[in-house]
Image (spheres, rainbow, N blue to C red):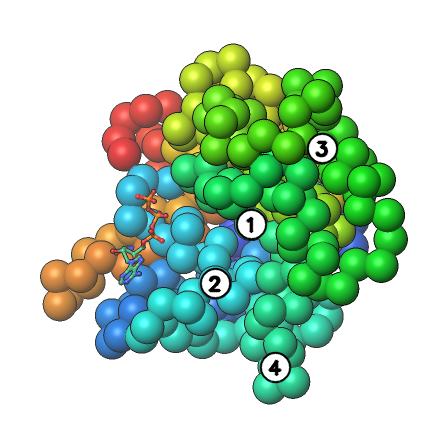
């Protein structure tokens, strides 16, 4: 085990953690084929908090994020060891249906990916196939309002979601995730394809959404991590003897601590831009 790994620092004992644990990983290892991609991640994602994952490219941020809603199940050869619990239920337990996991733990991707359908159908479609029995008009309006895009689209609900700007498309995708009433929303670099104004809108939206949802966001933008998150997990990667790189969690704590007074020198080096 590397000198840089200190398990005690992967579980902060801070005020931000006083909320109930929504997600918890214990000694999580993720492999692609026989290659270990991330090792020994233990952390708690508290309910109704925003947690940012930061770190250099390839350190496993997206890999860990995808474990939270079993998206890695869809990648041939991907394998998880250790435990992930979602409100104390083993997320990888034999009786757990990955599709229902993804309903409760939604995901927004780097590139906005609306369905090639109307704005209305982008929201209504998922609800309908999930057997939603309520008023679809109401659901569409409420979801678009929660994603702060209702005013911009309310007069063109029949138009294609693909005709919206990139920033609007991303908020539409957030509305689509919200419409399924998830507990957690995972966001994998949700602003990296957006201009600064759209980015600001999405960041404001994250602030609003955390009243109701738990959010985990992967971001390369450290200003964004410091603006939007309550807690930050810093990952790094190191070369193994075989010459592969393996990611690990260096430090996890309140965002202000990670950015202004981290416990580890490698965190300090990264947040001050000295590497990565
Ligand atoms: N589908 C896949 N198949 C095989 N290996 C993968 C796959 N996805 C990721 N990896 C490997 O797992 C490791 C971690 O990748 P991951 O994308 O999780 O890192 P990341 O920190 O999110 O990187 P980035 O910031 O560049 O998105 C890398 O070595 C990567 O090559």
Residue 196 horizontal side relative to residue 141, left or right: left
Give how far apart the Cα atoms at labels 2 and 4 are: 15 Å
Residue 194 horizontal side relative to residue 21, left or right: left
Q: Mark 1: is the Cβ under 8 angstroms from ligand 1?
A: no
Above or below, 151 against 236 in this view is above
SS class of the residue under badge 3? helix
Disc on res. 93: 4
SS class of the residue under badge 2? helix
Q: Is residue 106 visible?
A: yes
The disc, 2 or 3, on the residue closer to the chain's N-terminal end is 2
Q: Residue at point 13% right, 67% down? A: 242
The disc, 3 or 4, on the residue closer to the chain's N-terminal end is 4
Q: In the depicted view, which residue is nearer to us: 92 or 229?
A: 92
The disc, 2 or 4, on the residue closer to the chain's N-terminal end is 2
Dot 3 and dot 4 residues touching (CB under 8 Å): no
Give how far apart the Cα atoms at labels 1 and 2 are: 9 Å
SS class of the residue under badge 1? strand
Q: Nearer the viewer, mark 3 or mark 4?
A: 3
Q: Residue 71, how many percent across, how many down?
A: 48, 63
Q: Residue 248, how many percent across, how many down?
A: 38, 56
Q: Nearer the viewer, mark 2 or mark 3?
A: 3
Q: Residue 241, how many percent across, how many down?
A: 14, 66
Q: Nearer the viewer, mark 3 or mark 1?
A: 3
Q: Which residue in the protein does label 1 denote?
A: 107
The disc, 1 or 2, on the residue closer to the chain's N-terminal end is 2
Q: Which residue in the protein does label 3 denote?
A: 144
Give how far apart the Cα atoms at labels 4 and 1 are: 21 Å
Residue at the front extreme, as displayed: 158
Dot 2 and dot 4 residues touching (CB under 8 Å): no
């Amino acid at each position: 085990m590397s000198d840089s790994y200190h398990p005690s620092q992967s579980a902060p004992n801070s005020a931000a953690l006083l909320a109930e644990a929504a997600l918890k990983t214990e000694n999580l290892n993720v492999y692609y084929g026989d290659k270990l991609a991330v090792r020994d991640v233990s952390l708690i994602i508290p309910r109704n908090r925003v947690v940012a994952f930061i770190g250099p490219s390839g350190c496993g941020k997206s890999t860990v994020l995808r474990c939270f809603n079993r998206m890695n199940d869809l990648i041939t050869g991907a394998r998880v060891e250790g435990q992930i619990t979602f409100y104390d239920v083993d997320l990888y337990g034999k009786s757990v249906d990955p599709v229902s996991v993804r309903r409760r733990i939604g995901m927004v991707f780097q590139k906005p990916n609306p369905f090639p359908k109307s704005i209305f159908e982008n929201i209504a479609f998922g609800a309908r196939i999930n057997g939603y029995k309520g008023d679809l008009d109401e659901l569409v309006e409420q979801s678009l309002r929660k994603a702060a895009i209702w005013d911009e689209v309310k007069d063109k609900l029949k138009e294609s979601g693909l005709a919206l700007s990139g920033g609007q498309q991303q908020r539409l995708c957030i509305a689509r995730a919200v419409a399924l009433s998830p507990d957690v929303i995972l966001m994998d670099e949700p602003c990296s394809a957006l201009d600064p104004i759209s980015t600001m809108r999405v960041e404001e939206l994250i602030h609003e959404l955390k009243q109701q949802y738990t959010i985990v966001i992967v971001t390369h933008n450290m200003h964004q991590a410091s603006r939007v998150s309550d807690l930050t997990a810093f990952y790094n990667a190191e070369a193994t003897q075989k010459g592969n790189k393996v990611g690990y969690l260096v430090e996890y704590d309140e965002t202000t601590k990670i950015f202004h007074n981290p416990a580890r020198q490698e965190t300090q080096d990264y947040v001050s831009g000295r590497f990565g």
